[in-house]
Image: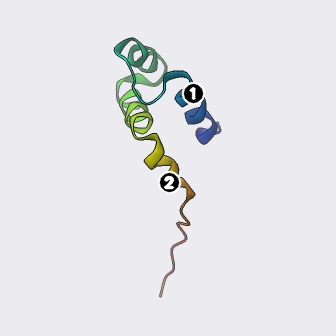
Amino acid sequence: MDYVSLMKQLHRQFGENVRMRDFRILVDVFGESGAGAVKEILENYSTWQFVLSQDTTLVDK
């Protein structure tokens, strides 16, 4: 599954303000804890996009 693509599609569908009826759909698909995590990402989508765009290469000294 392409997680980034899925989140983009969900963001287009629900936006950053996930309503209760939309959350119920997410619960049906992802379960209670998964829906909560997806809801958090959608509500903070621009921050999530920023984090994804950062170079996260770790350097070990």
> Compared to 57, does 54 lie above or below?
above
Would you place residue 58 above or below residue 9 in this image?
Answer: below
Q: Residue furthest top?
A: 21
In space, the residues marked 2 and 1 are separated at their CA atoms by 17 Å
Give whichever of 25, 28 is nearer the camera: 25
The quadrant in which residue 31 appears is top left
The residue singled out by tag 2 in the image is: 50
- Mark 1 lies on residue: 12
Q: Position of residue 1 (x, y in %)?
A: 64, 36
Mark 2 or 1, nearer chain start: 1
Q: How is the image coloured?
A: rainbow
Q: Amino acid at mark 2?
A: Phe
Residue that appears at 40% across and 30% down: 39
Q: Give the residue drawn at x 35%, y 24%.
A: 32
> Quick check: 16 above or below 57?
above
Under circle 2, the secondary element is: helix
Q: Amino acid at mark 1?
A: Arg
